[in-house]
Structure formats: structure tokens, C-alpha cells
Image (spheres, grey):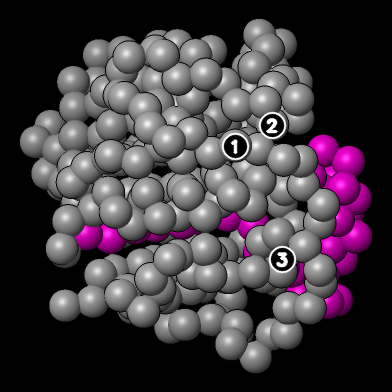
Amino acid sequence: MNDRFLPRTSPADDASDPISRSSPHTAAATVPAGGACGTGAAAVPAYLSETYTWAYLSDLGTKVFDKHLIVQAILWGNADRLIDSVVAELKPGWRVLQPACVYGDFSLRLARALGPTGRLDVRDIAPIQVALTRRKLAGVAQATVDQEDAAAPGKGPYDAVACFFLLHEVPEEYKRAIVNNMLDAVGPDGTVIFVDYHRPRAAHPLKPVMSLVFDRLEPFAKALWDREIMDYADHPEAWTWKKTTVFGGMYQKVIARRRT
């Protein structure tokens, strides 16, 4: 297992790591059939309001969590490392989709990496997150922020997609829809970057802690302990996949590039 991020040249990871846990029970959800950027018409899904109001849909939640030090603490000191690994995959002048708002300075760092000739389109289903991120990116000319459901098709084409800690927060049917929509959103030479949770090594001292957190607060997260992100793609054979993990396997970065 390669336990560190190596931009661009990182090898496939964890082929020998058996993943045998059964998928956790998830609440039923209906994936929207469509949506439009910037319309503000997309409805907040039931799973989000029922599970994550405390974290993403309340004024208190945004005030508590939208601080870089808090994000760093939640990710056990790995936030900068993970963000830097995404930035390393981007080039100035690229057009990039970020399919969900992220607490802290993630979007600002992406926009800076793209430079004034690039473009960062940040999208989120929650109006409160859209408003918060618009304030954070005020004055950043190369960034746009609008309401859109990542599970709705019709995005792109982009040079890259940066999907940062989104998949663990959505039910299985949303995971599949989002992965396929992100793959569809890039052009022939496009890059899709997924950063999210991953099954920690068996002896990881924080594995029991994270298991308890997921059981109590993140009911859709353990699916990423059981399945590879590429397994959610309808046509994984059409892409090359590279995975690296960090922090004893707790986090993963998966890069998908279309085969030519």
C-alpha cells in the first residue's frame, strides 16, 4: 500500500486489501432526473435535511464548522495535505467543477491555483452553503457559485472535477449518480479527482473512533469502506483509475482519466 499522495504519478493502491464489510442500511432516496445551474429551483433532498441539518443547513453549523482549524481537526490534521493533493492535479487556466461546497478555504485555494485565466464553478444543493461560499469568494473573478444538485446530469464540459468529501455524505443511489455525472462532466482529456474517506488499516488506532462517528452521525460513509469509488461508475473500463491513500488508509484520492 502506498500511504502518501504522489501527484500525477501515484500507483494504484490497496489491491490486496480485502474489503468484506456488508453495506450499511441507508434511507431511501430518489435521485433527481435533472436540474439547472443557478436557477435556485433544486430542492434540498430529504436525506440531507434529515441527516445533516446540524452540520450543513443551520446557521449554527456554518458558524462552528466553517473554519480551517476546525476542518483540520475533523480530518485529524490532514486537511492541508489533502487539499494540496487536489491543487497539485490542476493547471492554471483550467475550467474546474467543484460539485459541493467545502468548509474552510478549499475553494479559495482551488481558485488561486487556476489563476485569473481559469474558472472555478462551485455548486451545492443547499442555499445556505451557496450563500456562505459566495461570501468567501467575493472578489474572486474566476469563481462562480450557484445552486445545483450534483446528482442531476448535464454538467460540463470541464477540464477537471474536484469532488472533495462529498460521496461519504450521500446514499448509495446518489453516489452512483454523482460519480457518473462527474465523469460525464469532463472532456476527452479531462481529470476527475475524488478525495474521501477510505477503510483504515485493521490496526489503525482511530478506526474504532471513526466507526462510532459514522454509525452515529454519518450513516452513508461506511459504504466507502466496502466499495471502491470506481465501482459506482457505469463504465469503469472506459477510464484509467489511480488510487492513493494517506493516514493509515483512512483517506483516499482517486483520479479517473478517460481512456483514449
Front of the two marks 3 and 1:
1
Q: Earlier in the sequence, mark 3 or mark 2?
A: 2
Decide which of tag 2 and tag 1 comes sooner along the chain. 1
Decide: marks 3, 1 in contact (CB < 8 A)?
A: no
Residue 217 is one of the magenta-drawn residues: yes
Question: Which residue was labeled with disc 1?
Answer: 30
Given this view, does label 2 or label 1 mark the residue nearer the observer? 1
Quarter-wise, where is residue 218 in the image?
A: top right
Q: Which of marks 3 and 2 is in front?
A: 2
Identify the residue shown where x is 58% and y is 70%: 228
Q: Distance between the residues labelled 3 and 2?
A: 20 Å
Q: Quadrant of residue 58?
A: top right
How far apart marks 2 and 1 lie (CA) works out to 9 Å
Using the image, determine if residue 176 lies above or below residue 126: below
| Residue type at tag 2 | Tyr
Dots 2 and 1: beta carbons under 8 Å?
no
Front-lying residue, 95 or 22: 22
Residue identified by numbered label 2: 47
Q: Where is mark 3, residue-wise?
A: 225
- Name the secondary structure under disc 2: helix
Would residue 215 be counted in the magenta stretch? yes
Q: Hey, what amino acid is under mark 1?
A: Thr
Q: In which quarter of the image is residue 19?
A: bottom right
Badge 3 crowding class, 10 Å Cα cut-off, few under 14, some 14 to 19, many 20 or more, is some
